[in-house]
Image (cartoon, grey):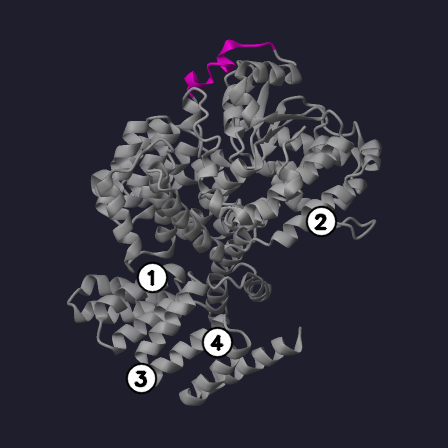
Amino acid sequence: MSETSLDIAELQKQARTQMYEGRFKAALSTAEMVLQNDAENIDGLYMKAVCERYLGQNETALTSVEQLKSLSPDFGRAYQEEGHIFRAIGDDEQAMAAYRRACQCNPVLQASWKAQADILESWGQRAAAVEMRGQEQRIAAMPKPLVAVSHLLHEGKLIKAETACRHFLQTNPHHVEGMRLLADIGTRLGILEDADFLLESAIEFEPDNIQVRIDYIQILRKRQKFAEALKQSEILYQRDTANPVFQSLYAIESMQTGDYERALDLFEQVLQKLPDDPVTLTSKGHALKTFGRHDEAVDSYQRAFQSDPGYGDAYYGLANLKTYRFSDEELRLMEAQEQGNGLSYQNRIHICFALGKAYEDRKDYDTSFGFYQRGNELKRVQSRYDADQMTAELHNQITACTPALFAKQSGKGCDAPDPIFILGLPRAGSTLLEQILASHSQIDGTLELPNILSLAHRLRRQKHASNDSLYPDNLHDLDAQQLRDMGQDFIDSTRIHRQGAPYFIDKMPNNFRHIGLIKLILPNAKIIDARREPMACCFSGFKQLFAEGQEFTYGLTEVGRYYSDYVQLMAHWDAVLPGAVLRVQHEDVLDDLEGQVHRMLDYLDLPFEQACIDFYRTERAVRTASSEQVRQPITKASVDLWRHYESHLEPLKDALGQSILEPQK
């Protein structure tokens, strides 16, 4: 730790002590010293706002809170402090909104629950106040160490939260709330297997703990264990078939397993009780979209934002259809919401991306770019993406996966020929290739399966007794049985997604990082690299708001750098695994569909079928952003769309570099 860091930490500690002693003037001075050294110090800004409020400087305090919220949009204590300031100036309406937002960001802010109860009682809303008091009492009953863990968790201090939670569980190994919190931390860190195990164990200790079971369902869904998630959601549903929360969960899990009729029936049951619930209406819209029922999806999304004009996910659901065009009235409604101060952070992100699409369709490209850029900037504040770390990770694949590795380990994996991996970058045309190939009678389309990424993550955390190397270096140390078992486990664990065809597609784009691992455990797997012209691919990613992951897309420099790293790594795989990967250029598919279909089927050693040409007639669930586009014949409408934005894209060009932008020979 540097001397400056130590100085700041000491100043923060001093300011906290002065605050606890009620010496707010001195604490404010100390907090300002922190900010002189680090203008974006979250704790320093928070203490500054608190001190200003206690000193009666409410307007200045609100300015400090606004700055704090812009730097850390999910920092619950910022909204709590905002609530305190509004109460101090007698504005209970705005205070109530701030306290609600605080509890959404951090549900263990006891003071915010208490304040809501006090305000509701003053308004004569006793029943609602009782509910708030219940939350206040729930937090009061929690062990103090777990309250501290929860604060760290919801403020993004995940490593500190993990350390504190593990310390608590050492002396309380079967404490279910502690296990639940550690699972939440693991989920946010991407350690899904550990979270799965913790929640499964917690359910064994407390099978009637509803929150634990809900968390377990969500982690099973993230791991794409859809059959087990469905089973768990059915357990809740059978407890109370009239409970709208349980109905909604069961609907979502039914949808994940392809039972759209049951999902839609359950959503309708929820809407009979809560006819204007925007969350359910939007979820129903997503289900209808995935199932290909376009007009009904549009209606459901529209009903959602008509019910709640600030519900951004509904607007973005329409934008993400790609084929929908917003009316003038809808455009004005979105702009009014975005210009106001009543939106939650996530709703603002959704609306910015939707406005970007709305103005793009109107050919007002400068205004469109402004909204895309704002949405990306807001999203990037939430992101933990580190471009240097990603570059290093991809470079490690180049240094570890050498010809010597493949010479030593070849022929040791599972010899199943079933998997076809379509990989590359998102928005590069992989969904189109999947739809084409899944139209073949011998190929099942599935999902973007997480199995290879999960295996790589396990290997990354695993050290072998023989040395201290980690993934991908430890690929050299795996024996034939381990490689065979890993390949067989992939085949077994993905079987649930298949429909019975001899071959199936895994369309996870990020698998390009792990082609070496794939060829070691599944030497007969086929791999198709979906490649798209760099400017078009990167800009398309930049203007897409992904459900989760793909955090490199939320900045022009970041996405350009990632593309460049991808091209470099793919060149390495071509060199060390010659002929293993078939590269399919998106523009070539648009220019010569039949020729590229023949080329892919020849590579897969499968006979030609006309259904692959008529792919848009194939009825199947498609869960990616391109779901509507691949249900239509080939179009070149978006090939050069990026050129309309070219004046804004210099950072992208710089990040890609001239060698990437030169036409491929």
Nearer the observer, disc 3 or disc 1? Answer: 3
Where 330 sits versus 129, above or below? above
Residue hosting label 2:
462
In whole angstroms, how far apart are the C-alphas of marks 4 and 2? Answer: 38 Å
Residue occupying the far front of the picture: 647
Earlier-in-chain disc, 1 versus 2: 1
Q: Could you classify mark 4 by the number of other residues whose Cα lies within 10 Å: few (under 14), some (14-19), or many (20 or more)?
A: many
Q: Amino acid at mark 2?
A: Gln
Q: Amino acid at mark 1?
A: Arg
Nearer the observer, disc 2 or disc 3? Answer: 3
Residue hosting label 1:
101
Is label 4 in contact with label 1 (beta carbons under 8 Å)?
A: no
Earlier-in-chain disc, 4 versus 2: 4
Q: Residue at x 24, y 64 (%)?
A: 130
- The magenta segment is 607-619
In whole angstroms, how far apart are the C-alphas of marks 1 and 2? Answer: 40 Å
Q: With 84 as the anchor, is 28 left or right in this view? A: right
Residue 11: image location, x then y, percent: 54, 82
Residue hosting label 3:
56
Q: With 569 as the anchor, is 172 left or right in this view? A: left
Nearer the observer, disc 1 or disc 2? Answer: 1
In whole angstroms, how far apart are the C-alphas of marks 3 and 1? Answer: 23 Å
Nearer to the camera, 487 or 470: 470
Q: Quadrant of the N terminus?
A: bottom right
Earlier-in-chain disc, 3 versus 1: 3
